[in-house]
Amino acid sequence: MKNEKVWKIAMTGVFAALSYVVFTFLQFKIWLPGGDATSIHFGNAVCVLGALILGGVYGGIGGAIGMTIGDLLDPVYVVYAPKTFILKFCIGLIAGLIAHKIGKINEQTDQKKIFKWALLAAIGGLLFNVIFDPLIGYFYKLVLLGKPAAEVTLSWNVAATSINAVLSTIASVVIYMALRPALQKSGLFSQVKAAAK
């Protein structure tokens, strides 16, 4: 039991580091009027992948911590760090709920069912983000920056978040389907199954 807890915490740290690196160094930043920016990135894919492997809570925490640190270290995004933490944690929670509680993905052996539940989990978590990231971002900017800045950036944020969702869905499912057999072969899948419960 103690080793399982240590493993979960260690893997959460791995996913936090991975989401930070992917979000920070593999992003295409789009500058917006007023000095604001949005970006195309694969950070959300790491969050979903963490939820598929570790479960919603640990996967969500890993993705949320990594991307929040990325925001805190970027002068453009630093004011959005609290919003990022909450939204990315929710992506993981939703993806984990769909994959593990509803689809029972770790108990499946049929590759088509595994693919289906991984895809549905990714879509569910990222659809939440497509709706709530721009919406919460709009109200966040309305309070922090004033109405004109919020209205100008809303359509750009919707577009960037939608592109990120499509790219992250594809990436997270493809990587999960490739990693799952490797985890099984290495003997780590039993720890993954225990972590996701």
Image (spheres, rainbow, N blue to C red):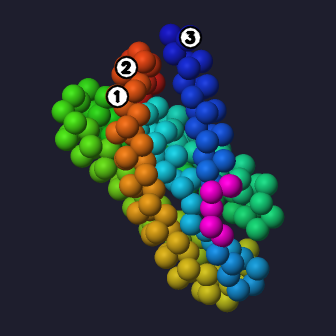
Q: Magenta segment, which residues?
A: 24-29
Q: Is residue 114 above or below residue 194?
A: below
Q: Which residue is mark 3?
A: 2
Q: Is residue 94 shown to the viewer in this render?
A: no
Mark 1 residue type = Pro
Q: Which residue is mark 2?
A: 185
* Mark whose residue sits in front, 1 or 3: 1
Q: Is residue 107 above or below residue 88?
A: above
Q: Are marks 2 and 3 in contact (CB under 8 Å)?
A: no
Question: Quick check: is 56 in the magenta stretch?
Answer: no
Q: Position of residue 15 (x, y in %)?
A: 58, 38
Quarter where residue 128 is shown: bottom left
**SS label for mark 1:** helix
Image quadrant occupied by the C terminus? top left
Q: Position of residue 72 (x, y in %)?
A: 76, 55
Q: Are marks 2 and 1 in contact (CB under 8 Å)?
A: yes
Q: Is residue 81 above or below residue 156?
A: above
